[in-house]
Image (spheres, grey):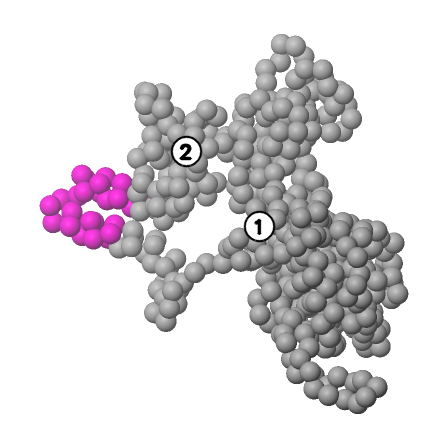
Amino acid sequence: MAKFELKLPQMGESVAEATIIAWIKEVGDVIEQDEAVLEIATDKVDTEVPSEVTGILLEKRFEVDQVVQVGDVIAVIEITGDSSLGVSAGGQKDEKEPHETAPQINNEVPFVPQPNEVLKTAPLASVSAEEERFYSPLVKNIAKEEGLSALDLATISGTGSEGRVTKNDILAYIAQRKLGAAVKTAGPESSEAVRQTAQLATKSSTTSTTVSAVKASQSGEVVPMSRMGKLIAQHMVQSVQTSAHVQSFIEVDVTNVVAWRNKVKAAFETREGEKLTFTPIFLEAVTVAIKKHPMMNVSLEGDQIIKHKNINLGMAAALPDGNLIVPVIKNADQLNLTGMTKMVNDLALRARNNTLKPDDIKGGTYTVTNVGSFGSVFGTPIINQPQVGILALGAIRKMPAVIETPEGDFIGIRSKMFLSHSYDHRVINGALGGMFIKTIADYLEAWDPNTPI
């Protein structure tokens, strides 16, 4: 049988690594082609990695919570049946002789002990792949150094996630075990001293990991950052350190846009089965501005400016946990308003349901975020690398305004909003940054209230 190396696929532009969050398949499981093998997470999206072949999972190269680089081999699959992929990753046929046994199972596989005499003295490395309890490599190394058997480990109560045995758990167990041995050999006068020494050793193994948390909790609740939160934080800091951020702001009169949408939204939903929001209208205006100012549709790699032919608009969307993700509308300039509306609604829905795929967040050339949906008047968004600009849409508010007419000026109530444009001053100067949002503003203010749907 041939072996196939399953590699971490490209997750999107600027994404170089991912964290394994769960293995769906275990060693020895049968896998169908296109069936999910594991779940991974990046700062962009959580997704599943499918198998490209039908076969049996032979080896897992990484454990849960480990970080994997794009292109790394994460699993080895033995191909079964007729398959055009029946070659190894190097393109050579597997030369294993018919009588040769299958590769040994990686002893890093999770396990639970079985109640038999062999297991009582079995070293850690001999536990079979069918066993289910998970022990981290650190816990296994400590157990091996201390000569603990699988049965010994099974008696330890874990305080970690899903009952896992932590470093502190195993150190406490070892301390208690040494206490028992010392008490047996010590005289009556020394037994109590031995017991106190062991208790101090046990306590010291946990104190170091809790001191900082105790100090912090004295002034409030300690809440660890989520995995995605930490990745987003790293991405944002990296962007600020990379790009010379500068902002331009402009106020836009969108009275005609608001009146038109209110007039046609019911008929549009009846005809298309889709809700017409303001977002696709604003995205259409952005595509018009990018076509007029193509230098906004670039990215910077080193000292090379990459001009993109396609206009792929990133659209910041909220996730259920409060984080943001940026799905991408590919070739946005080729969509009419109906097509743009359907694409916006589809991506927003799948973002809320955590069903976006890696390709959905890949290849963006310019990003738009709607801070107005949270009531913000304007904001200063951080550029989504390696792009050079991002637009923030502020809240639409009814405002008193001076209206100029041939008969003179008067005060009226108008619907207005702010556009906030952050751009990379290494590539985009103030003139281009300002003209870009002025083009968007002109397009929106000139909106024809009689535009057909």
Please tell me how many numbered marks the rendered image carries: 2
> Where residue 133 sits in the image (x, y, percent)?
41, 33
Query: Does the segment drawn in magenta span residue 193?
Result: yes
Q: Which mark is residue 352?
A: 1
Looking at this view, name the residue that lies furthest to the left.
Answer: 188
Residue at position x 57%, y 46% from top? Answer: 353
The first of marks 1 and 2 along the sequence is 2
| Residue 429 seen | no
The residue where tag 2 is placed is 133
Q: Is 139 located above or below residue 31 in the figure?
A: below
**How many residues crowd around disc 1 within 10 Å: few (fewer than 14), some, or many (20 or more)?**
some
In the shown orientation, is residue 105 left or right of residue 184? right
Residue at position x 80%, y 84% from top? Answer: 405
Residue at position x 63%, y 56% from top? Answer: 317
Distance from label 1 to label 2 (Cα)?
A: 33 Å
Q: Bounds of the magenta span?
A: 174-199
Residue at position x 29%, y 51% from top? Answer: 202
**How many residues crowd around disc 2 within 10 Å: few (fewer than 14), some, or many (20 or more)?**
some
The residue closer to the viewer here, 118 or 105, is 105
In the shown orientation, is residue 131 left or right of residue 12? left
Q: Quadrant of the N terminus?
A: top right
Amino acid type, mark 2: Arg
> Where residue 85 sits in the image (x, y, percent)?
74, 23
